[in-house]
């Protein structure tokens, strides 16, 4: 036991250095773990908000497409009417 005490006294700097390394490694691991948890939370939040945003944009696009389809139908009807009037006046049967 006395040999261990004398060795510890002689190598106190080494022992303190090793203890400090273990503490630093533990702190680094805790920091990395905390960062990973924070990052996962952010990713989860972005996925949730992004999904809601995407659904809202898709609904908006559907409404725009429906409006454009109605405009196309109105334009086609107008073109047919114009064509009928023009061919009637020219006495041409299409």
Image (cartoon, rainbow, N blue to C red):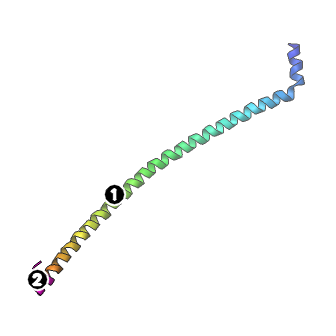
Please tell me which residue lies in front, 24 or 87: 87
**Horizontal placement of 41 versus 68: left or right?**
right
Task: Find disc 1 in the rendering and name its residue.
Answer: 59
Residue plotted at (61% across, 39% down): 34
**Between discs 1 and 2, the one toward the N terminus:** 1
Task: Find disc 2 in the rendering and name its residue.
Answer: 92
In front: label 1 or label 2: 2
Q: Is residue 73 above or below residue 37?
A: below
Question: Helix, strand, or loop for circle 2?
Answer: loop
Quarter of image, res 23: top right
Circle 2 crowding by C-alpha within 10 Å: few under 14, some 14–19, many from 20? few
Quarter of image, res 17: top right
Please tell me which residue lies in front, 33 or 74: 74
Residue plotted at (53% across, 47% down): 42
Extreme residue toward the top, this view: 1
Question: Helix, strand, or loop for circle 1?
Answer: helix
Q: Quadrant of the C terminus?
A: bottom left
Residue 54: x %, y % from top left: 40, 54
């Amino acid at each position: 036991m006395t040999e261990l005490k004398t060795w510890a006294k002689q190598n106190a700097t080494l022992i303190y250095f090793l203890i400090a390394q273990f503490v630093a490694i533990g702190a680094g691991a805790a920091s990395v773990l905390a960062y990973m948890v924070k990052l996962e939370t952010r990713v989860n939040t972005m996925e949730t908000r992004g999904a809601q945003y995407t659904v809202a944009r898709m609904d908006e696009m559907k409404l725009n497409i429906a409006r454009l389809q109605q405009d196309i139908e109105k334009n086609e009807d107008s073109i047919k009417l114009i064509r009928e009037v023009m061919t009637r006046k020219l006495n041409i049967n299409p």
